[in-house]
Amino acid sequence: MKRNLFVITLLALSLTAGAQQARKDFKADRNLSASNYLAYPGPLQAKLTAAPKGYEPFYLSHYGRHGSRWLIGDRDYNRPVNILAKADSLGKLTAKGKDVLHKLTLLRDAAYKRDGELTLLGAQQHKGIAKRMIQNFPEIFKGKTNVDAKSTVVIRCILSMENALQQMLVMNPELQIRHDASYHDMYYMNQSDTALEHRKVTPEARKALDAFNKKHQHPERVMRLLFNDDNYWQNEIKANDLYKVIYKQAGNLQSTELRHDFTLYDLFTDDEIYDLWVQDNAWWYVAYGPSPLNGGTQPYSQRNLLRKIISEADSCIQLKHPGATLRYGHDTMVMPLTCLLDLDGMGKQITDFEQLDKEGWRNYRIFPMACNIQFVFYRPVNGKGDILFKVLRNENEATLPIKAVTGPYYRWQDFKNYFLKKLDAYEK
């Protein structure tokens, strides 16, 4: 019965039941169309599967993205305001155009000198994730146990880590916490791979992306909502660039406190929302996913991180009460790591971008703000038996491409055998 419930849960989470599931998702909640700007939705799984009989959790290893943030780059805030303000000075804006200019100006002013910084919601997200860690696995965090936390050197990641640790200390003041953010650890916390970077968008991939984007680019209706002169927007501005940056602003608005005051999504139809999202989804699939158009190797950018997770886990499981290893970084680590691990089938190779949604590869389910991957380890209470573990993807139980022992639980040795062989084959 438990196994059946687990399968049903995974089917619900992966949302692969029909073609263009994303359309249905966006109909229910347009915020989901924001891709990596989606504010963390929290766990979708109501209840985690109980530990196998005779086992208890004793160690947790985690890598998570920073929480909700402001946009990176002042130009994303200034550019649309400057374009619309100039048009307004020339009498080229409609009433709707003036309204959008007002809203974008409010966003720009609120974001002043906060380039890429953590928002209040981002801090709250990590407090919530930390709280649920302790609530779900109290055995791991009891008493004077150790918590080793590391962050990349980026301030939004450091603050995400600190908010999570503050929450943990509130719940258990006895925790022995060590936290750090250093370039010393960036080789695995935020690996830079020049060779893979150069192969990211091959000529074949660029040709396919350009053709796909052209099919789904339709800014005309929105331009006519904003401007009262077709000749002006057709000749004086880059309409598609403005269209996309306003959509970007609409998506990231949910991460700010201004989300309580207004929306920008009302500017777009359901079809436009979907067409804008599929372009984003295809780009992320090529740039950080397992796309065969560039050899399917981009997920290996996280090979150092995966090796570090394995080696630190091997060390920690030798201890009586190892506690937790927490790491705070970026979406560009979580997405390729998800694909490298092939969690819930996210490592599948798909040539036709039109099939991504149909095949269940939807970026908003992989890397929202504060997205995270947690390895939760279990050992037999009597000390006799294999070390088992499960993986939580955004706090939902995930599948791996190896045989499970029961439900979402796998043997750690099986995992190591499979993935170390996979990493060795790539590096050779």
Image: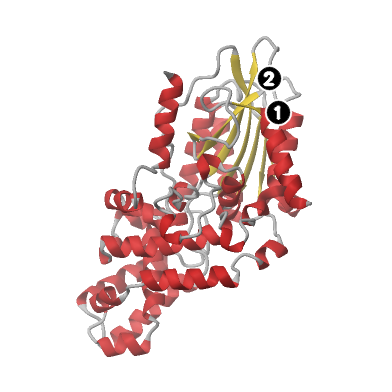
* Alpha carbons under labels 2 and 1: distance apart: 8 Å
Report helix, strand or loop for mark 2.
loop
Report helix, strand or loop for mark 1.
helix
Q: Position of residue 259 (x, y in %)?
A: 34, 55
Using the image, tell me which numbered label, if any, was put on residue 413: 1
**Above-or-below relation of 212 to 182:** below
Q: Residues within 10 Å of mark 1 (few under 14, many from 20)?
A: few
Q: Is residue 183 left or right of residue 93?
A: right
Query: Which picture quadrant has residue 421?
Result: top right
What residue is pinned by disc 2? Answer: 386
Query: Which picture quadrant has residue 306?
Result: top right
User: In the image, what residue type sits under mark 2?
Assistant: Asp
Q: Position of residue 151 (x, y in %)?
A: 65, 47
Residue in view at x 59 percent, y 51 percent: 336
Work out whether residue 146 can be spotted.
no
Residue furthest left in the image: 95
Q: Residues within 10 Å of mark 2 (few under 14, many from 20)?
A: some
Residue in view at x 34 percent, y 50 percent: 19
Q: Is residue 20 left or right of residue 400?
A: left
**Above-or-below relation of 115 to 81:** above
Using the image, tell me which numbered label, if any, was put on residue 262: none
- Check contact, mark 2 vs mark 1: CB within 8 A: yes
Query: Which picture quadrant has residue 239?
Result: bottom left
**Sequence-first tag of 2 and 1:** 2
